[in-house]
Amino acid sequence: MKERIDEINEHLIYSYKRYPVIFDHGEDVYLVDVNGKKYLDFGGGIAVCSLGYSNDVYKNALKEQIDKGIHFSNYFYSEPLAEAAKKIAFISGTDKVFFCNSGSEANEGALKLARKYAILHGHEDRHEIISMNKAFHGRSMGALSVTGTKKYREPYEPMLPGVSFAEYNDLDSVKALVTENTYAIIVEALQGEGGIYPADPEFIQGIRKICDENDIMMICDEVQCGMGRTGRMFAFEHYGIKPDIVTMAKGIGAGISVGAFAARSEVADCMVPGDHGTTFGGNPLAMKAVCTVIDEFERLELVKHADEVGRYMGEQLAALVESSDICVSARGLGLMRGLEMSVPVADYISRALEKGLVLMAAGANVIRFVPPLVIEKSHVDDMIGILSDVINI
């Protein structure tokens, strides 16, 4: 395997620090490498593979669509596009949706839509955006500009002007940054890359109030924490608020590349032909994936399942904290959890991989758990067993 990896690296730009494993295929909630070794997957393709790897309804729907057509172009309609738009609008509580290919693109589009709204509503001079420290919204230049971690931004500065960063879960720090030129506040209801931090209710509800009082667009980035991940279809639902614009990706395609931003009609209708576009966004294959994923969520009651199994995982991680000197805290919602440790987690993730468990980090000291939403409590027990062995409990 090492020789093959060396060959592969000869032709790849070194932008990922990959683990020395070549995966061949997936089975249920497991990944299998080219040597036949199975790994329990608690990374879920970075919170993407919500249905796991053996959902025949999903796979057969994609195969059928491949036979019918993969790409037609956005100069025309397709039935999968029509159906997917209706379903996404319904589950997100919005009216209209724009389909793209990734979370970064979804956030880029949301920023443009918010700016267009400001221009058309008498705020032509508004050019300031508020984001949060430790936020992650993507790696394209606009999305990167509102990503609240300096190490991602600094190599590419100068960034988009007019961006300021508040402290997550500190409403006063948000208020201090609001000016007459603020046109959008972008926030995750549960920070992912920043360390798995759920929003405090008064924080996210306070942002909603600030936006209402100042005609500012509230953008909720649900790329990672959305689509059932937290035990609600979207994480903002935990707080009884509705964003003006919601962005999504990852789990809505369950493996097929698709992103989207959605809004109520008053906001969405600010965009007109020529304002925004993407060649591959909304293609029939991706749209068939979206439709099938949403249908399978309903059939399998996956949001409820994620909430139930997620609570169990939270309890088991909390018990791990109680029994370990190096585990500091466990936090999260549903099947998006984090285990903070007093030491860097990289070595522990590598050791877990050697024992057949796929984990991820969220910063230097947090292990992130974002498994397929179809995992069972028995899989949680297996994960806890391996992790306990790795950290010598």
Image (tube, rainbow, N blue to C red):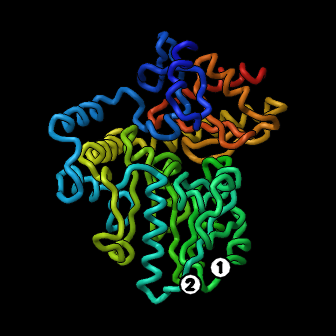
Name which of mark 2 and mark 1 comes first in the sequence: 1
Q: Are marks 2 and 1 in contact (CB under 8 Å)?
A: yes
Disc 1 residue type?
A: Val
* Closer to the camera in the image, 128 or 62: 128
Q: Position of residue 387 (x, y in %)?
A: 68, 25
Residue at point 44%, 33% (across, down): 374
* Closer to the camera in the image, 90 or 146: 146
Task: Residue under label 1, please give it.
Answer: 178
Residue at point 18%, 41% (across, down): 69
Q: Is residue 208 above or below residue 287?
A: below
Can you tell which quarter of the image residue 3 is in?
Answer: top right
Q: Residue furthest right?
A: 325
Disc 2 residue type?
A: Asn
Q: Which mark is residue 86?
A: none
At mark 1, the secondary structure is loop
* Closer to the camera in the image, 2 or 357: 2
Residue at point 36%, 57% (across, down): 91
At mark 2, the secondary structure is helix
Q: Is residue 382 visible?
A: no
User: With 375 as the anchor, is 268 left or right in this view?
Assistant: left
Q: Position of residue 45 (x, y in %)?
A: 49, 35
Q: Position of residue 305 (x, y in %)?
A: 46, 40
